[in-house]
Image: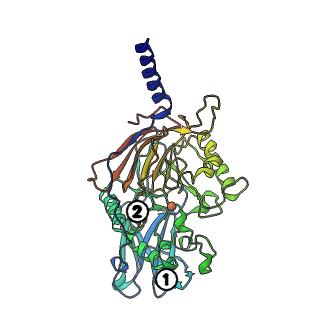
């Protein structure tokens, strides 16, 4: 009798552990040292030599489909030179030089006055072509290059990099150098929190300049697709600065009008085989708001026959099992999650939490009240949620995960790094996450991701 009841207890314990308690994924055993990481001194980011030399050069997509580019730069002392010379390095129009002039903006923030911020939008470029561009004149001329994407189409392979919450510390530099040394990525999907200037007294906007110089080594050569995070708000009534996103929106332009958006904080682009939607966690998104009505229409415009991969970028994650920023993305999730499931979004990339986490395909759309478990359920129409706020900024690592690991969390690790999404065709994409301490060939997390529209089978997570 005693043996039988003991056996029953063991069986019950096993069943309970399967059903309720420890069905989560992997919490990596790798533990990064929680060391202090101050921003590098301003002197670490000197401007280029020469009087009024163009600096902080960066590019982003400039139209809906990838034949456009926005080239941005800052001249510190004079508005001139206000044009960029560009030419194809190959193809029928090789070496035929053209000139585009820029719109100039500048702004004041507390006691800071920006330099002249130039944004030149160029459209009608050839697809899949290398271009050179030159900014500045005489001894201050600076030469850069980029490659346009292939024409939008369902089986066009294309590789994206993903970084979030970068900042400007030695860890940030490790992340960016590691990313640059990984030669495969063609475009950066940046999920918000850029300079962390607002962590300095009076939101020291010179830190926006140093950050622009810092990222130039990548952002001048491949497009960075921008998402706004909370560190872009720069809303500071105590400084009489009442306009949210003022430095960010002056410095980082995006092609929002090409996707019928009325704000640069939410927009979309098509690039190769991907339709990428950018949302703002820190703008209104409730029913009837501009962002809400735009997203509702935007999802009807997605054409999976043209762009099979539907990717969303936003800053505050909807699924996060870290004690840092826990459930901050919840109200946006409640507002939009059912749309993402109906639209079969493939992947949602977020930042904000300074660690790495990948979810299972789960949703909270359908509730099963009677089973007594108020937990997300597996849903093969749901996106994979990836939190990649691990760029290495001044605020340090978020090393406090909830315990036990919840069932929706497939893999998580408190380290700095970047990710690569290599789309192969309409059905398959290879995804890898690279922690800074490893060589580039090492993927600390990897997964073959299957397209939700063309091949909606369950991925082998681990
Ligand atoms: Fe953030």
Mark 1 burial class by Cα count in 10 Å: few <14, some 14-19, many 20+: many
Question: 154 or 360: nearer the eye?
Answer: 360
Question: 26 or 131: nearer the eye?
Answer: 26
Whole-number angstrom distance, CA of label 1 to CA of label 2: 30 Å
Spot the residue most to the right.
288
Q: Which residue: 35% across, 86% down?
A: 50
Question: 204 or 447: nearer the eye?
Answer: 204
SS at mark 1?
A: loop
Chosen colour scheme: rainbow
Q: Which residue is mark 1?
A: 115
Q: Position of residue 224 (x, y in %)?
A: 45, 62
Residue 360 versus residue 178 in the image, above or below: above
Q: Is residue 204 visible?
A: no
Q: Position of residue 143 (x, y in %)?
A: 35, 74
Q: Which residue is mark 2?
A: 396
The residue mark sitting in front, 1 or 2, is 2
Q: Position of residue 191 (x, y in %)?
A: 49, 58
Q: Is residue 189 visible?
A: yes
In which quarter of the view is residue 2 placed? top left
Left or right relative to 396: residue 282: right
Residue 252 versus residue 28 in the image, above or below: below
Mark 2 burial class by Cα count in 10 Å: few <14, some 14-19, many 20+: many
Q: Which residue: 67% across, 50% down?
A: 297
Q: Position of residue 327 (x, y in %)?
A: 56, 51
Question: 219 or 139: nearer the eye?
Answer: 219
Count of numbered badges drawn on the protein: 2
């Amino acid at each position: 009798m005693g043996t039988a009841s003991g056996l029953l207890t063991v069986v019950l314990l096993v069943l309970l552990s399967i059903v309720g308690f420890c069905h989560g994924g992997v919490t990596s055993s790798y533990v990064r040292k929680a060391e202090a990481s101050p921003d590098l001194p301003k002197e670490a980011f000197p401007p280029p030599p020469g009087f009024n030399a163009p600096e902080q050069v960066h590019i982003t997509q400039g139209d809906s489909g990838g034949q456009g580019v926005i080239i941005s730069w800052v001249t510190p002392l004079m508005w001139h030179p206000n044009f960029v010379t560009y030419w194809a390095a190959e193809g029928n129009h090789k070496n035929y030089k053209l000139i585009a002039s820029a719109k100039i903006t500048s702004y004041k923030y507390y006691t800071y006055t920006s330099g002249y911020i130039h944004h030149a939008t160029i459209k009608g470029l050839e697809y899949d072509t290398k271009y050179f561009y030159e900014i500045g004149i005489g001894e201050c001329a600076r030469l850069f290059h980029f490659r346009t994407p292939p024409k939008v189409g369902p089986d066009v392979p294309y590789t994206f990099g993903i970084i979030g919450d970068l900042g400007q510390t030695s860890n940030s530099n490790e992340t960016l150098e590691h990313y640059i040394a990984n030669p495969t990525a063609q475009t950066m999907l940046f999920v918000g929190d850029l300079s962390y200037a607002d962590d300095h007294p009076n939101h020291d906007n010179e830190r926006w300049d140093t950050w622009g110089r810092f990222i130039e080594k990548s952002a001048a050569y491949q497009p960075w697709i921008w998402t706004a995070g909370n560190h872009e708000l720069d809303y500071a009534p105590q400084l009489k600065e009442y306009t949210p996103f003022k430095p960010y929106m002056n410095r980082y332009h995006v092609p929002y009008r090409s996707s019928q958006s009325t704000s640069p904080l939410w927009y979309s682009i098509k690039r190769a085989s991907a339709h990428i939607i950018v949302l703002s966690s820190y703008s209104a998104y409730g029913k009837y708001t501009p962002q809400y009505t735009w997203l509702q229409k935007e999802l009807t415009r997605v054409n999976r026959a043209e762009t099979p991969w539907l990717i969303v970028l936003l800053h505050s994650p909807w699924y996060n099992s870290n004690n840092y920023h826990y459930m901050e993305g919840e109200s946006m999730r409640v507002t939009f999650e059912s749309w993402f499931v109906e639209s079969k979004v493939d992947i949602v990339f977020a930042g904000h939490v300074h660690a790495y986490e990948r979810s299972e395909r789960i949703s909270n759309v359908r509730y099963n009240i009677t089973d007594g478990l108020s937990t997300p359920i597996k849903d093969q129409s749901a996106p994979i949620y990836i939190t990649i706020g691990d760029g290495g900024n001044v605020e340090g690592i978020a090393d406090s995960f909830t315990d036990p690991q919840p069932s929706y969390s497939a893999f998580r690790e408190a380290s700095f790094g970047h990710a690569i999404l290599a789309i192969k065709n309409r059905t398959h994409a290879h995804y890898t996450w690279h922690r800074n301490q490893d060589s580039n060939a090492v993927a600390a997390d990897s997964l073959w991701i299957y397209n939700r529209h063309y091949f909606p089978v369950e991925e082998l997570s681990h």
